[in-house]
Image (cartoon, rainbow, N blue to C red):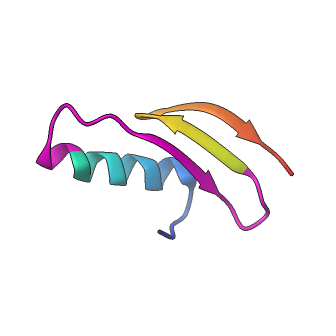
Amino acid sequence: MEGGSAKELNRSFLSALRRVEKKTRLRAEWTSEDGTVQKYFDYVLKRTVKP
């Protein structure tokens, strides 16, 4: 997926999944072009790792 920010992508992806199944949980890692990795659990940012 591509988008403006990891937070925006995570939110839209989880919202889409929850429209289908309300009890969905999501653990996700989003990597930006500069190599920064953001880790999310549901809507909450848990960790940011810079290269």
Residue at 51% x, 47% y: name it: 7
Q: Is residue 31 above or below residue 37?
A: below
Return the residue found at the far right: 51
Q: Residue at x 25, y 36 (%)?
A: 24
Residue 21 lies in the magenta stretch: yes
Position in image of residue 14 (x %, y %): 33, 46
The total of numbered circles placed on residues is 0
Left or right relative to 20: residue 31? right
39 relative to 41 in the view: left or right: right
Q: Residue at x 13, y 48 (%)?
A: 20
In the figure, is residue 11 to the left or right of 31?
left
For residue 40, above or below residue 6:
above
Residue 37 locus on image (x, y percent): 70, 49
Q: Residue at x 20, y 43 (%)?
A: 18
Residue closer to the observer: 43 or 29? 29
29 part of magenta stretch: yes
Residue bounds of the magenta highlight: 18-36
